Every structure is written in C-alpha cells, then in structure tokens.
Amino acid sequence: MRRLRSVRGSALALAVVVVCGAGSASVAEAAAPPTLLINSPLLSAGLAHTRIVGRSKKGHHGHHHAGKGHRREAVNRNAPKLTRKGMTLSWPALHGVKTYVVREVVKHGKKRVAAYYVVKGTHVATHDHAGLTVAFRVKASVPGAQWSAKVLIHYPSVKKPRPTTSGTSGQAAPSVPAPVVLPPSGDPIAGQKLYVDPNSDAVQAMNQATAAGQSANAALLAKIADQPRAEWFGDWISNPQSSVGSWVSAAAAAGAEPVIVVYDLPWLDCGGYSAGGASSPAAYESFINGVVAGLAGRRAVVIVEPDALAEVSCLSSSQQASYFQLLNYAVATLTTDPLAAVYLDSGNATWQSAATMASRLQQAGIAKARGFSLNVSNFDTTASETAYGEAINSALGGSSHFVIDTSRNGQGPGSTWCNPPGRGLGAPPTANTGNSQIDAYLWIKDPGESDGSCNGGPSAGQWWTSYALGLASNAAG
C-alpha cells in the first residue's frame, strides 16, 4: 500500500480531494467530471467502541488482550463531521486519532485496495478508473475502535480517439499536439518546479517511522521524501497511456513538471538484475505510442532507456541494429510532444569513452532530442560526470545538453556498482546548475530502491529502508 504524508499536529483540518486520473481523456474529447453518487449514512453516525478498564497485557505481535479481572465498558464519541464542497471531503482532526482513506476498486471481478494517510489539500490520484464506480472509505481509528464512512465516486467512460497506423508496428499512432512556444532560453526545465511525489515509498517509510516514534529515522527519510523523483515505466505497466497520464496529470495538478523514465527495450540489462523489457520490437513501439498518448502534449522530462547505449555491445549484431532502430523511433515519437524534454541515456564516465558514446548517440537519433542523461542509478561524482558530459557534447558538435543523476553520488562511487555501502545522497534536484550545458541535476534513480539482490539487497527496484537511511545519513552537505 502507498500512503500520503501523515499530518503533523492535531490542530489542522484534514481534506481529501478525489480526482480522475485517466490519462486518455486529454487525447480525445474531454471527459465529464467524476460524480459523487452517495454519502453513506455513517457520515453522521457516532463513534462507538469498547475500552478495556484496567491494565492490559501484550500478546503475540503486540496485540492487546484483556487479562483476568479486566472488564470492558462502552464508550461513545461523536464521529467527525464531514462536509463536502464539490469533490472535496473534509473533516476536523481529532486528537490522538489516525485518519486515512482506503480506496477499493473492483475491476474484472478483482478488488484492488490502496490506503493513504491524508494531509490537508492533498490530491488522492486514481488510476485506470474510467467507466468505473470506485468506493472510497474514509476511516478514523483509535485504540479498540474504528469509525468509517463510505463514499462512491463514478468516473465516466472516455471516448477513444480513432486509431491510425504507425506504418511500422501497425499500432495506433499518438496524436501530434499543436506547437507550443518554449521559453526564450529554449531550456524546457529552467524555471519549472519539479514534481514531488506525495505517494512515494520514501513518504510511506517516513510515515511508518513517525508512527513508530522513530523521529530520527523519520527526519532522515524526509530528506528523500521531500525531493522530486522520477517515475519509471516499463514492462510491469499494463497500460502505459493510462499510467503515464495519471503521473503527468498529478504533476500538472500540483503545478509541477514530472520526470519520467521509459525502460522497456527488449533484452534489457543483458540478462542481469533488471532483465526484462518488451517482448518484441513491435511491442516496444506500441509501448512508446502509449507513453506519448499519456503525455498528451504536456510538459515532462523524459529519460530514454537507461544503460541501453552504454551496454549495447553485449547484444548480438541483429539485436544491436534493432536497438538503434527502436531508440530512433522512441526519440522521434516522444519529441512530437513539443514540451517533452527528451534525453537519451549515455551511461556514465566509467563505462564508455566520450567518443564511443557520442557515436552511439548519433546512431540513436540524438539530433532530435534535447540531449542526453548521465550517471543514472550510479554513484560517480558530479564533477566527473560534468567533464564526461562536456566531452561528449564537444564530440557531438557542442549544441546538445545533458542532465546528471545526483540521487546517490554525495560520497562518490563505492567498491561495487550494486548497492555499495557508505554512499550518500547527492545535490538535490535543480535546474540551477551554473553550467549552460547542464539542464538539471535530477534524482532519476529513486534513492532507497535496491540495485538488485546483491550486498544484502532485495530485488532490483524494491524499496529498501535501511539503505535509504544510510544514504540520508551520508548526504552531501
């Protein structure tokens, strides 16, 4: 379950804003707004529970049981009074009461449940809900009791755009948005607020530490939770248009620019910890088409296929040819969104020479992209990557730009590339780099996610709280 940041202090009022996250609405005609169907009678019901009088003892797993001689007595409390304005539900915070939202979605006969702590004014983004009625259950809990109120929201169906063929895979081609004028600098990131994900694993871990009374750990995890991060999209996403659309919509609602990573090329990672990817070149083109449809002409930073160009030599000659063809397709298609800042990944300074990387970038279609990305999921220093990026740019003719992943490079590289101990967070994400060739420092790798089942870590991409704490403890500056 993914949670929003919990409220710090009981005096604040709480509110949950329910919004439609279907990404397909913006590429067809606008969808009707979601409809609040009913308020459960429980909205005005009392909070009744029993309490144990006398001392209790802890059983297994910390659960409380009434011991001999203990008795129970009924306790009645007034339930929080909910008010509604449009699609916003709000209620007063109660001292000592944990309040949260449980979303129950039934789709194809299966129930999907997600829970959120709620902070005032936070959007609870929904996913893949077009045409569905979704149950949101607002809950407040105290020891020994729980109050709840059920609200049903109906999300209208979205009219699908008429498909056309791409000419290569036969999949629907994304619509091309109208041209949009960029700032005079041409830099698509400068002056933009980068999106901070309120549902991140770091936020969840921070909330858990707070609930457990681990204030020091919560403060460390806040160093990650409070920063913009990238969202990765690959073969684990069943509907890239909807998933990308939800992420971009959430960022737009927050007035921020999202960072996304497309990571779905066939034969990923040469069979390593992150092996996987699209089942065929045609499937990859379909994936890219879905990503662009989800972007729908909106602003985003797009990192294209981390490690692909750096490790392409591990593939067969036919697979290498396919990689260059598919990367060209990805860049050409993604850049039909004039507000998408597209960066082809170029590994890091310790992998390939600048001349080799520049040659591969040219074969992959760098001429149509904004530039290239460096140090994704790696630990090399910013100074080293800056020199490497400038050398690549020089070999390309000097007109390109690049971004550097600083998420975990605060202490430089370790003894191994995979979950090295003793590393630290690097410079926070910013477009103020002081170098005209560097568009931004970004956290492309989510700090705290494992590199793979090495050095005691979980599988690649899984959250690892102890490693996150170490990164935060050793943060640069």
Image (spheres, rainbow, N blue to C red):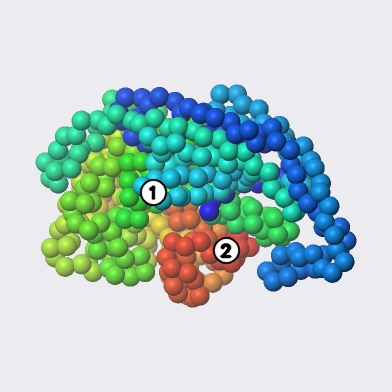
- Identify the image quadrant of residue 271: bottom left
Distance CA(mark 1)–CA(mark 2): 34 Å
Q: Residue at x 33, y 45 (%)?
A: 240
Rate crowding at label 1 as few (under 14), some (14 to 19) or many (20 or more) other CA atoms within 10 Å: few
Q: Which is more toward the observer, 473 or 49?
A: 49
- Whole-percent x and y of residue 104? 50, 45
Q: Is residue 254 left or right of residue 46?
A: left
Amino acid bearing label 2:
Thr
Q: Which is more toward the observer, 68 or 237?
A: 68
Q: Tell me the element at label 2.
A: helix
Name the residue tied to disc 1.
109
430 w.r.t. 389: above or below? above
- Whole-percent x and y of residue 73? 84, 52
217 w.r.t. 153: above or below? below
Q: Residue at x 15, y 58 (%)?
A: 321
Q: Residue at x 56, y 24 (%)?
A: 86
Tag 1 and tag 2, C-beta contact below 8 Å: no
133 w.r.t. 373: above or below? above
Rate crowding at label 2 as few (under 14), some (14 to 19) or many (20 or more) other CA atoms within 10 Å: some
Q: Residue at x 47, y 38 (%)?
A: 134
179 w.r.t. 375: above or below? above
Can residue 13 be seen in this snapshot?
Answer: no
- Identify the image quadrant of residue 276: bottom left
Q: Tell me the element at label 1.
A: loop
Lower position in the chain sequence, tag 1 or tag 2: 1
Q: Is residue 417 left or right of residue 447?
A: left
- Identify the image quadrant of residue 467: bottom right
Amino acid bearing label 1:
Gly
- Whole-percent x and y of residue 224? 57, 53
Name the residue tied to disc 2.
465
Q: Which is more toward the observer, 31 or 424?
A: 31
